[in-house]
Structure formats: C-alpha cells, structure tokens
Image (cartoon, rainbow, N blue to C red):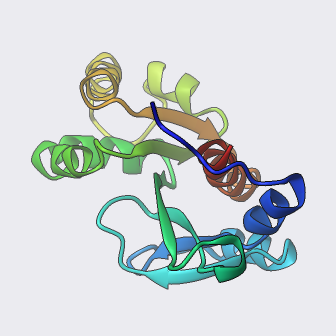
Amino acid sequence: MSLKYQYSDNELKELLDSIVIQIDTREQKNYHITDYLDKKKVSYKSMKLDHGDYGAYIPKNEELGILRDTHIPVYIERKNSIDELASSIKKRTRFENELIRSQKSNFLILVEDGEGYEKLINSDYKSNYNARALLGSLKTFEARYGFSSVFVSKTTAPNYIYHHLLYNIRERLT
C-alpha cells in the first residue's frame, strides 16, 4: 500500500503555481515557447536534460514539507516538423538510445505541425523516408518504449507543453 500526503486545495494550487519548466540547454528556436511562459508568468530554467527538451519540477517549499527541488519524471521532446521527426528516426541508434533513457518517465514527442499526421501518412514532407516505413517505425517505437506522439500547431505548442507538464505533476500530487 502506498501512502500519499493529501494536500489541501490551497496547498495544491500553491505547488502547481510554483512549478518550474525545465528547458534543455540544447533546445533552439523556442522563443514562441518562452514568450508564452513569460506572458503566463510561469517560471522556467535552462538546464541540461538527459532526455527530452522540456521537463518540470516543484521547487523546494519547506512550509509544505518539500525539503528540496522535486523533479517529476515527465519529459517532452519537441520536433519542429515532420522532416525533423523523420531525420531523428532515420538516426535509429541515437533516437532509440534517447527512448531507452526515457523509459522510466512519462515521455512524449510533440511535433509542431497540426496537420503533421496527415502529412506523415501522405508523404507530404521533404525526407525521402517512405511514409509507410516512417509511420511503422514511429508506431513500433511508441509500442516498444511506451511513449506517445502528438501533432499540434506551432501556435498551440507552448500551451500544450505547459499543460501537459502541469497536469502530469498535478496527477502525481493528488
């Protein structure tokens, strides 16, 4: 039997309002994401992540019994297009190594293209990767390593990233 501390609604709100979004130091061209976080007054910190481009943690809060920063194992790997996704999957060993490292976490691949899945299955991308093979590789990796992929527009990606991390943390706290 596992026991969890039951936070009051006010305590839970305080904890969730304090989360810090982690941004991998190698992440590039993400001003639309940091601008969104700035507008929403969400804290973020650039740091090296072992896998993924985005993660989150709850900062130390001694009043609520959190004696040190608490890192939550949820990560998002952002791809800016189907072509970047295809390029990553083509580099199978490197891509698979990242998936292996991420297995003990809640891991998600986010592709910034709201029509990305349709483009993927219709070969509407620059890569010479066969659409059926690309889809097969992606879905095989998802099944093998227990992650999901989502396709969202660049304009909604910052909102998706923030809320995906927020609600994964909330679920762990309740």
- Residue 106 in percent (x, y) is at 44, 42
In the orientation shown, which residue stands out farthest toward the left?
93
- Residue 145 in percent (x, y) is at 27, 32
Number of marks in picture:
0
160 left or right of 93 in image: right
43, 33: nearer the viewer? 43
155, 171: nearer the viewer? 171
- Residue 129 in percent (x, y) is at 27, 32
Q: Quadrant of the N terminus?
A: top left
Q: Quadrant of the C terminus?
A: top right
Q: Quadrant of residue 53?
A: bottom left
Q: Residue at left 19%, top 44%?
A: 100
Q: Residue at left 22%, top 48%?
A: 95
> Vertically, is 93 above or below 18?
above
Q: Quadrant of residue 147?
A: top left
86 left or right of 39 in image: left
Q: Residue at left 89%, top 61%?
A: 10
157, 167: nearer the viewer? 167
- Residue 19 in percent (x, y) is at 67, 69
Q: Residue at left 64%, top 51%?
A: 5
